[in-house]
Image (cartoon, helix red, strand yellow):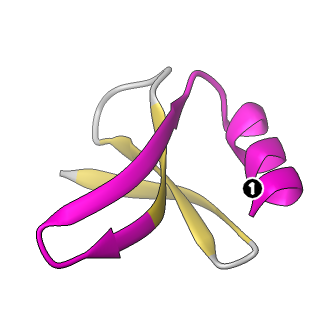
């Protein structure tokens, strides 16, 4: 189960409930697939969204 930590530009930064140090950003999601990136910090994930997406 995932929980949303922060929302940047409409993209949710999520982590698995009860954990820390692994944050996921879903880039694309479709029928039967999901493209995501994993980061160690919220700051790195937010910076990725700001610069790339």
Looking at this view, name the residue that lies furthest to the left: 32
In this rendering, is residue 47 above or below 22? below
Quadrant of the image occupied by residue 28: bottom left
Mark 1: which secondary structure? helix
Q: Which residue is drawn at 54% across and 65% down?
A: 12
Q: Which residue is drawn at 16% across and 78% down?
A: 31
Residue named by callout 1: 49
User: Is residue 20 shown left or right of residue 12?
Assistant: left
At which x and y percent is residue 3? 36, 55
At which x and y percent is residue 44? 75, 33
Indicate yes or no whether the magenta region holds residue 34. yes
Tally of numbered discs = 1
Question: What residue span does the magenta drawing correspond to?
Answer: 28-53
User: Is residue 39 shown left or right of residue 24?
Assistant: right
User: Is residue 12 shown left or right of residue 4?
Assistant: right
At which x and y percent is residue 19? 34, 26
In this rendering, is residue 16 above or below 31? above
């Amino acid at each position: 189960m995932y929980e949303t930590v922060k929302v940047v530009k409409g993209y949710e930064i999520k982590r698995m409930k009860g954990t820390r140090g692994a944050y996921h950003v879903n880039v694309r999601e479709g029928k039967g697939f999901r493209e995501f990136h994993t980061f160690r910090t919220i700051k790195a994930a937010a910076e990725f969204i700001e610069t790339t997406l």
